[in-house]
Amino acid sequence: MTAPPPPATDQYLVEQTLLGNGDAFATLLDRYERAVYHLAYRTMRDAEEARDVAQESFFKAYRSLRTFKPGAKFSTWILSIAYHACCDRLNRRKRYTNEELPDRADPGPGPAEAAVARDEAARLRAAIEALPEKYRTVITLYHLQGKQYDEIAQVLGLPMGTVKTHLFRAKEHLRKVLTEVTQ
Amino acid sequence: MNHDFEDDLDRMLAALPLEEPPAGLRASILAATIYRPAFPIRLWEGWALGVISALMLWLVVLVVKGGGGAFVGSIELLSSFAWRALSSPALVLWLALGTAIAMWMIYFNTYWTAPQHISRR
């Protein structure tokens, strides 16, 4: 019995897409659709806008696939595109609606509500939701990328030290909120 | 922040499912990318069509305004100019050099070797 072929690398899929193989791009989409949507949803906190951001991100990635550097990580690249699309929308939202950028916790499903649910995932989700924007994004990327701080820094366009500081503060916020809820 | 909490948080984050994308998102992205109908003509074809159309228009205007004589006169003027220019060895040399460089760039530049329209296999 022969072993199944190893899954194609992202780099290979990018090359195939550039050679005209549409299925290769569909595979990339399958791999990163959820991550991109998740980042957009966590940053925008609006399902409709998150959908638009995800669509826009993949469209931009597809159109500028030739600029993707060989050796770079596709996940970092696509998440960076998505993050910048979110920033553009948040800035526009602020300009046109005079709505403050969600740099401070805004009323959402709060920790108390989550406590009623007594569900760990719901509590954590609510706690992340209540974080200021910069911490929320960094913790979302930490969730998506793990402890690859350099990649989180690349996505956000921030120095690694700043990312670590944001992450530390985000965790501090979460610790406070989650321990308050459980007490 | 203690390590226990950090470990707990890592565990909780690892267990936290990603947001489920709305139904139809994948289809709409594919429709906007690989299934997007290709533009029927390429950029250089558009330019060529534009130039040919302008020449045709110019021809029509000449014929309408001055009859066949003006048209023949203009063609003669243009052809004599082209003939004079091409009789100069230096100009021909520059043209050959330019063409060779253009061919070389087209051959070696990956941008031009990749297909313009993405098709789904």
Image (spheres, rainbow, N blue to C red):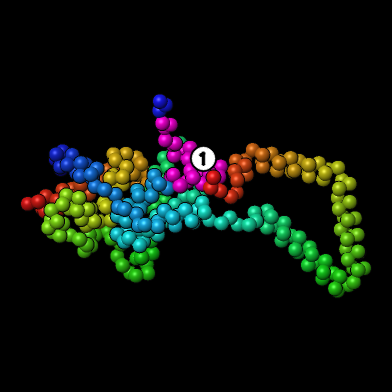
Q: Amino acid at mark 1?
A: Glu
Of all residues, the one furthest to the bottom in this rendering is B65
Q: Is residue A134 left or right of residue A19?
A: left
**Where residue B22 sits: x, y (%)?**
35, 57
Number of marks in picture: 1
Q: Is residue A24 left or right of residue B107?
A: left
Looking at the image, residue A21 lies above or below residue B67:
above
Residue occupying the point 13% across, 53% down: A118
For disc 1, the marked residue is A15
**Where residue A23 sits: x, y (%)?**
49, 45
Residue occupying the point 92% across, 68% down: B69
Magenta stretch encompasses residue A29: no
Looking at the image, residue B84 lies above or below residue B89:
below
Residues shaded magenta: A4-28
Position of the N terminus of chain A, as image quadrant, is top left
Q: Nearer the viewer, residue A63 or A26?
A: A26
Res A115 → quadrant: bottom left
Residue occupying the point 83% across, 44% down: B92
Of all residues, the one furthest to the top in this rendering is A1
**Where residue A109 sits: x, y (%)?**
20, 61
Magenta stretch encompasses residue A8: yes
Q: Is residue A133 left or right of residue B106?
A: left
Of all residues, the one furthest to the right in this rendering is B69
Element assignment for label 1: helix
Q: Nearer the viewer, residue A106 or A123?
A: A123
Q: Give me the chain letter of mark 1.
A: A
**Where residue B91 sits: x, y (%)?**
82, 45
Q: Residues within 10 Å of mark 1 (few under 14, many from 20)?
A: some
Q: Nearer the viewer, residue A54 or A156?
A: A54
